[in-house]
Image (cartoon, grey):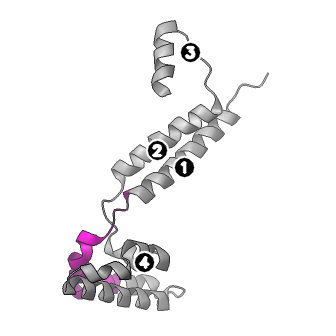
Amino acid sequence: MIMCLLMEVIMSKSVPPVTTGEVGFASFFLGAGVGYVLAPRKYDLEQLFQISDDTFERALPSKDMKIYTVEQRQARDKIISGRNQIKQVIETVLFDDKMKELLSKHEYKNAYQSIKSIVPKARTQTALILGIISGVTAILIKKFSRPKN
């Protein structure tokens, strides 16, 4: 689609009208590409402590842990223990202190290193979010920047 528009511009030396939908569509894919490239490769330990329960279960499903090593299973259990501690203080002022405390402990760092190879990539999530934001922003800009007749 974009290539066709570019070829038309080159061939006719005049810019064809571009619809708001085309701008949003192109911006979505551009934003998604940028989001994918700039996103972290894996969920880090802090993200594993904070993501919702269902996202954590999708990232590290308990049913799939049977195929991993004993060390990886223990690491998952250790991270779940840290998640439970975070949940207890999430609504209090102690949240930041607790997060810093857990992130600085070697036992959690070692648990994360043991399980890091099976943690899914965070790129898809970041790419989708950035793509949606880019697309919606481009549509709004295009819609509201039209000259009024």
Tell me: 107 left or right of 79: left
Mark 4 and mark 1: Cα distance apart in space:
25 Å
- Amino acid beneath label 1: Ile
Mark 3 and mark 4: Cα distance apart in space:
50 Å
Q: Which residue is mark 3?
A: 15
Instruction: Mark 1: give few (<14), some (14-19) or many (20+) Cα within 10 Å.
Output: some
Question: For the point 27% across and 71% down, which residue is it?
Answer: 118
Q: Which residue is mark 4?
A: 57
Q: Is residue 64 above or below residue 123?
A: below
Instruction: Mark 2: give few (<14), some (14-19) or many (20+) Cα within 10 Å.
Output: many
Q: Earlier along the polypeptide chain: callout 2 or callout 3? A: 3
Q: Which residue is mark 1?
A: 132
Question: For the point 34% across and 62% down, which residue is it?
Answer: 121
User: From this viewpoint, is residue 104 visible?
Assistant: no
Q: Earlier along the polypeptide chain: callout 1 or callout 3? A: 3
Disc 2 + disc 3, Cβ < 8 Å: no
Q: Is residue 104 magenta?
A: yes
Disc 2 + disc 1, Cβ < 8 Å: yes
Q: Which residue is mark 2?
A: 31
Mark 2 and mark 1: Cα distance apart in space:
8 Å
The magenta region covers 100-123
Q: Nearer the viewer, mark 4 or mark 1?
A: 4
